[in-house]
Image (cartoon, rainbow, N blue to C red):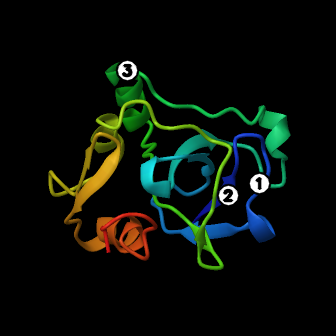
Amino acid sequence: MFLYRVETKDCRVFPNDTITELNTSMAGVQYRLYALRHTRRVLYFFTTMYYKESSETCQAYGGRLYTPRTQDEVMMLQKRRMFGFVGLTKFTGHWVDSAGQLYEEPSLWHSLYPIGNGNCARVQDGYLIDCNCRKRERRFVCDVLYESSEGSSLG
């Protein structure tokens, strides 16, 4: 099990220090999630890998928000089995806001997410416009993104 810890860019942890356990084949490695604000208030997360104990504070790592800018950087992430945009979260009926930033190149979304079926989720001009994920991918993308998405017709 990995521990996914949801934190804002300035290191504030989301309500109740929310930690979600997700299955993974890479035991012993932990990911910190940094929030990326997206259009239509759909919130994605990008993972930054670190090998320290989860008791370490965010400030100890500088609280940096890392967004890949080139295909080379995307490939580097894939080689390390780091996949971004694993979902969004919502508390008490509202999308959790972030201190993040708009992802500058939505086209990289496909490269970062393990889509499996070739066109699991489609992003155009910063909007999620289609989602036909299956099995494991569907749990992390479609089912979450399609649930009560504010200001959109995804549901």
Residue denoted by label 3 = 70
- Quadrant hosting residue 104: top left
**Label 1 residue SS:** loop
Q: Say above or below: 105 vs 58.
A: above
* Residue 42 visible in this rendered orientation of the protein: no
Task: Find the distance from the CA under tag 1 to the CA under tag 2.
Answer: 8 Å
> In the rendered image, which residue does mark 2 sit on?
5
Q: Please, what is the three-letter code of the amino acid marked with disc 1?
A: Ser
Q: Is mark 2 on a helix, strand or loop?
A: strand
Q: Are marks 1 and 2 in contact (CB under 8 Å)?
A: yes
**Tag 1 near tag 3, CB within 8 Å:** no
In space, the residues marked 3 and 2 are separated at their CA atoms by 26 Å
**Image location (x, y in percent) of residue 133:** 23, 65
Q: Position of residue 47 (x, y in %)?
A: 54, 45
Q: Mark 1 points at which residue?
A: 54
Please state which amino acid type lies under the numbered disc 3: Thr
Taking 144 as reference, is 52 above or below it?
A: above
Along the polypeptide, which appears first: circle 1 or circle 2?
2
Position of 36 compared to 105: left or right? right
Quadrant housing the N terminus: bottom right
Q: Is mark 3 on a helix, strand or loop?
A: loop
Q: Which amino acid does label 2 sit on?
A: Arg
Of the pair 152 and 3, the residue shown nearer to us: 152
State yes or no: discs 3 and 2 in contact (Cβ < 8 Å): no
The image shows residue 145 at horizontal and vertical percentages of 39, 66
